[in-house]
Image: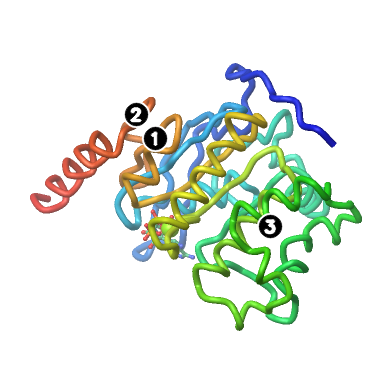
């Protein structure tokens, strides 16, 4: 299959959170992890989510990706409102439309690297596009490791399997929670470059949580969270500008 470059349609929203709130616990121990967050993730765009530890980045990603329930507000993936879906439909939507790269790689220990990469498609009964699969595997540098099981791979290699797994089925939207957190800077740059190319050349939509200003600079836009709310955004970020913005957070954290 040849892939035709997709024209950017920035007006189409791949995912949207509206007035999204997530509260953990009750009473004294209550934590407001998300406080009425409204944010769009336009189709064909690479968005980074940044913010201090505990600011709600993972919670936002998990709620928008249909992995976690929310307390109020709404989440849409494409035209589908998540709260209208039954469990089975939600599972199906996640399987068919969403790719994940988790902070902990979530690989199955009994499967080889290749089996882990194609697992979501195997479950869905879909055949991977062979040329695309090969491209993904080459790009993340795993061709020599396909028969290894996760315990026989380094942390960085496991992370690359997780990245390849998310990309392999060409989902409508890919969510990554610090997808390059365990990679050395060269492998990290390769993975980020590949994510960015999949956005530029294939119209893929990517949403990535990161603490790393360099990683964030691969994105088209950075959303900054603090205390469960969106406090800023930056279009066409550079590592230096992101770093400056993060320093402002740190300064605020020390004085409060
Ligand atoms: N299961 C849970 N029960 C109670 N509180 C939780 C739970 N999960 C997260 N929280 C709280 O919600 C807030 C947001 O957590 P979240 O994991 O989204 O932060 P984060 O921005 O991803 O942080 P990090 O950068 O450390 O990964 C934190 O205060 C956290 O302690
Ligand atoms: Mg997190």
Q: Quadrant of ligand 1?
A: bottom left
Relative image position of residue 252 (x, y in whole percent): 14, 45
Residue tagged 2: 234
Vertical placement of residue 147 versus 218, above or below? below
Relative image position of residue 219 (x, y in whole percent): 45, 36
The secondary element bearing badge 3 is classed as: helix
Q: Report whether 129 appears left or right of 73.
A: right
Of labels 2 and 3, earlier in sequence is: 3
- The extreme left residue here reads 255
- The extreme front residue here reads 144
Q: Is mark 1 within 8 Å of ligand 1?
A: no
Give the spatial CA distance, label 2 vs label 1. Answer: 5 Å
Residue tagged 1: 222
Relative image position of residue 151 (x, y in whole percent): 60, 83
Q: Which corner quadrant of the image does residue 226 belong to? A: top left
Viewer-nearest residue: 247 or 36: 247
Q: Is mark 2 within 8 Å of ligand 1?
A: no
Whether tag 2 and tag 1 are in contact, CB under 8 A, the answer is yes
- The residue depicted at 17 percent of the width and 49 percent of the height is 250
Relative image position of residue 76 (x, y in whole percent): 65, 34
Of labels 1 and 3, earlier in sequence is: 3
Vertical placement of residue 35 versus 4, above or below? below
Residue tagged 3: 165
- Position of the N terminus, as image quadrant, is top right
Viewer-nearest residue: 229 or 128: 128
């Amino acid at each position: 299959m040849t892939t035709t470059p997709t024209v950017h349609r920035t007006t189409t929203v791949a995912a949207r959170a509206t007035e999204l709130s997530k509260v953990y616990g009750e009473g004294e121990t209550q934590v407001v992890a998300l406080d009425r967050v409204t944010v769009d993730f336009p189709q064909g765009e690479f968005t980074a989510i940044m913010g201090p530890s505990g600011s709600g980045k993972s919670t936002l990603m998990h709620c928008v990706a249909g992995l976690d329930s929310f307390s109020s507000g709404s989440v849409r993936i494409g035209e589908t409102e998540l709260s209208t879906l039954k469990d089975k439909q939600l599972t199906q939507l996640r399987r068919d439309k969403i790719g994940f790269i988790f902070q902990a790689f979530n690989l199955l220990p009994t499967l080889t690297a290749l089996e882990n990469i194609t697992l979501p498609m195997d479950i869905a009964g879909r055949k991977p596009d062979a040329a695309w699969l090969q491209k993904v595997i080459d790009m993340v540098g795993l061709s020599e490791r396909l028969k290894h099981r996760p315990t026989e791979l380094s942390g960085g290699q496991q992370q690359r399997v997780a990245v390849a797994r998310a990309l392999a089925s060409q989902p409508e939207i890919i969510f990554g929670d610090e997808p390059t957190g365990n990679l050395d800077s060269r492998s990290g740059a390769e993975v980020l470059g590949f994510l960015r190319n999949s956005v530029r050349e294939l119209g893929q939509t990517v949403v990535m949580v990161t603490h790393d200003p360099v990683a964030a600079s691969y994105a088209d836009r950075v959303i900054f969270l603090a205390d469960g709310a969106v406090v800023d955004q930056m279009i066409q970020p550079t590592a230096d500008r992101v770093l400056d913005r993060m320093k402002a957070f740190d300064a605020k954290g020390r004085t409060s």
